[in-house]
Image (cartoon, rainbow, N blue to C red):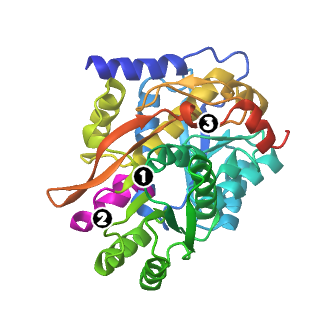
Amino acid sequence: MRARNYFVGAAFALLAGGMGHSALADDIKIGEINSYSLLPSFTEPYRKGWQLAVEEINAAGGINGKKLVVISKDDGGKPADAQTAANELVSSEGVAMLTGTFLSNIGLAVSDFANQKKVFFLAAEPLTDAVTWSKGNKYTFRLRPSNYMQAAMLVEAASKLPAKRWATIAPNYEYGQSAVAVFKKLMSEKRPDIQWVDEQWPPQGKIDAGPVVQAVAQANPEAILNVTFGPDLVKLVREGNTRGLFKGREVVSFLTGEPEYLDPLKEETPEGWIVTGYPWYSIKTPEHDAFLKAYQAKYNDYPRLGSIVGYQTIKAAAAILAKAGSTDTDKMIAAAEGLSMPSPFGEITFRKIDHQSTLGAFVGKTAQKDGNGVMVDFSYKKGSDYLPSDAEVEKLRPKD
């Protein structure tokens, strides 16, 4: 109980900050957009996470006595539908800010809308570096560690492998393209002896795993970078196991250690892959213990990484509103820049230079336990340790 009281108390002490003289509506509305119908394995736990956050915030008195209300819309995995949803949330529902999105191309579409309409947008999940760098804007902030951050964490381990011949497999859209590009850049900087011998670009959600596996095998790499996730990952692993693609080869894989992607593999889980993920069953910190206890009490289920993202997205949105003391967009931006707050993974900060949060990720290896996939030999990597300097960011990000 002491751990839980510490975490909840710290979070709500922040929310209780002075609201100033700007009046907020009786209900403070936040708009939320995500690909619920397209990617339920991630977005359903994500929804549970943000619903828990709303419940906790309102149970503690809301934001300066105002009830927090989240109005959620499904973008169906289509950028145009996401922009339509964003417009409806702003013009018809009168939300104070927009949050959410999953796919990187959708995150960029909503970020562009926010920039054009001068609306605050807190991106939850999209990982492309463009969100905060090449296409960054003053209205957009991001919670999750970016492709650059996760690639840097993985390269730290991958660069120590003896393998010199590498192949890549990634979905052919913004996220996959961004992840491969930054991993290759960072890996080649640390290991100039690396050869990139093959690239496979299956369409997202429609992988034909047989030809992909065959093509990679013919290139005869010593190591493989994988960026596929969800059902595509399951198909790739199944076909790769059947054809012996992974035997005697190192594999480095974005996201595969997240329960929503690891759990479906069960006894097919390949062992020894270097991955980013979320080993919820083995994290022992007061902050995570408090979150885990509250989540399991509400849902009688274990959290996925989506649960963390949804939970912290709304906690961050509420903290920004509380500090701003207003729903005025410019005041929220000023409040968010440099703002620190607790999270289930420890304290995080939204950097002023690029609006990227310092939320980190766990890096470890895949293994099997009792017929299920798990992460072992993992450690938490603080996001702040894997971001470029302000001087480098200034070269990457357009001036507001």
User: Per the image, is 267 magenta?
Assistant: yes
Q: Quadrant of the C terminus?
A: top right
Q: Which mark is residue 264?
A: 2
Is 227 drawn above or below residue 364 in the view shown? below
User: Per the image, is 288 magenta?
Assistant: no
The residue type indicated by label 3 comes to Leu
Q: Nearer the viewer, mark 3 or mark 2?
A: 3
Q: Which mark is residue 161?
A: 1
Which secondary structure lies at badge 3? loop
Q: Earlier in the sequence, mark 3 or mark 1?
A: 1
Specify whether 289 is left or right of 314.
left
Observer-nearest residue: 331 or 231? Answer: 231
- Point out residue 123 in the picture as x, y percentages from the top left corner: 61, 46
Res 76 quadrant in image: bottom right
- Point out residue 195 in the picture as x, y percentages from the top left corner: 57, 64
Which secondary structure lies at badge 2? helix
The residue type indicated by label 2 comes to Pro
Name the residue carrying label 3. 387
The residue type indicated by label 1 comes to Leu
Q: Residue furthest left?
A: 370
Give the class, few, some or many, for how many residues have Cα within 10 Å of label 1's Cα (few <14, many ≥20). Answer: few
Span highlighted in magenta in the image: 253-272
Is 185 drawn above or below residue 5 in the view shown? below
Asked whether disc 3 touches disc 2, contact meaning CB atoms under 8 Å apart, the reply is: no
Q: CA distance from mark 3 to mark 2?
A: 32 Å
Give the class, few, some or many, for how many residues have Cα within 10 Å of label 3's Cα (few <14, many ≥20). Answer: some
- Point out residue 361 in the picture as x, y percentages from the top left corner: 45, 41
Q: Quadrant of the N terminus?
A: top left
